[in-house]
Image (cartoon, grey):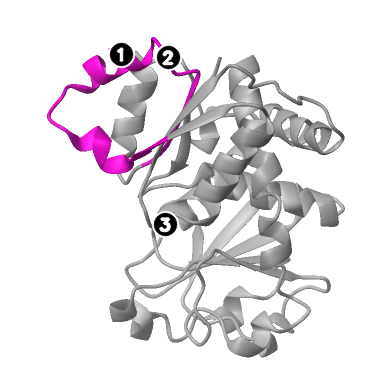
Amino acid sequence: MKSLIRLTDLKSREIYDIFRISDEIQCGKYIDILKGKSVVLFFPSSSIRTRVTFEKGIHLLGGQPILFPNEALDKKEDLRDVCGYLNNWADVIVVRHRNIHILEQLAKYLRAPVINAMTDVNHPCEILTDMYALSKIRKDFIHDKYLFCGALGNIGLAWKEASDAMGFELSQCCGNGYEINGLMTYNYVTEAISGKDIICTDSLPSNVLEDFRNCQITKEIMDMANDGAILNPCPPFYRGEEVSDDVIESKYFVGYEFKKYLLQVQQGIIIYCLLS
């Protein structure tokens, strides 16, 4: 069994293994693979897409999802002791918690695999799903050139993990002071967009919008990218802020279509972690 805390925990061939499993799920394989197994989930009440698709995916594979609020991991009780009890009953643990070190501690003490459903520094299941969706529509997505428009945060850092794991070229467009270490950065999207194929964005806190006034993705900006370029904003996105209304209504936007794969890819991650 194998935990997934960071995308860099995986080699590229292992990521393709998850994609293969996700394909096989859609062909009817792995029905009831979780029969008799319990998957314990720790999620905040605000989670929508990730939680719905994990719970539904577990149910469809025959498993029992058991949900707790993520604050249950912040109690005074030592995590070693929490894990000591969970080892009696849990077959997989899925955790969405701000602190990645909590997940690392769980992975250290649990016999069951731990799957990261989002932290403050990454979001591996989301980005694996995006790459899987890209593999369905691009000739070779690892040879595309990627641009992330947004601040230093969990989505940008997750794309950096993906580029390190898969070897594709990634750059960033952001205001001064929001750079991700190790990436080529631009302050003006009119310069950054040239030669790019895959444009990704993340939402911004209201108090930093002015710092990103030169980074908004519009339809006019997307027209300057490579032929066939696509826009994949991380939800929730906000029209009129990091993206314009017209670009969301344009041919470039693939967001809704991409996220439908969250179900199968997260199922694939669970199966991969159990069988590895």
Q: Residues within 10 Å of mark 3 (few under 14, many from 20)?
A: some
Question: Is the N terminus in the top left, top right, bottom left or bottom right quadrant?
Answer: top right
Residue under numbered circle 1: 85
Nearest-to-viewer mark from 1 and 3: 1
What number of labels is visible? 3
The magenta stretch spans residue 194: no
Q: Residues within 10 Å of mark 1 (few under 14, many from 20)?
A: few
Q: Can residue 143 be seen by looking at this rendering?
A: no
Numbered range of the magenta stretch: 67-96
Asked if labels 1 and 2 touch by Cβ distance under 8 angstroms, the answer is yes
> In the image, what residue occupies the spot 76% across and 24% down?
30
Q: Tell whether 116 sits left or right of 178.
A: right
Q: Tell whether 80 sits left or right of 10.
A: left
Question: Is the C terminus in the top left, top right, bottom left or bottom right quadrant?
Answer: top right
Spatial distance from mark 1 to mark 3, Cα to Cα?
A: 39 Å
The magenta stretch spans residue 81: yes
Nearest-to-viewer mark from 2 and 3: 2
Question: Does dot 3 land on a helix, a strand or a loop?
Answer: loop
Give whichever of discs 2 and 3 has the lower sequence position.
Answer: 2
> Which amino acid, by three-letter code, is at mark 1?
Tyr
Spatial distance from mark 2 to mark 1, Cα to Cα?
A: 8 Å
> In the image, what residue occupies the spot 81% across and 37% down?
23
Residue under numbered circle 3: 180
Residue under numbered circle 2: 89
Q: Can residue 57 be seen by looking at this rendering?
A: yes
Give the image location of residue 12, x and y in percent.
68, 32
Is residue 145 or residue 10 the one in the foreground?
10
> In the image, what residue occupies the spot 65% across and 80% down?
248
> Which amino acid, by three-letter code, is at mark 3?
Ile
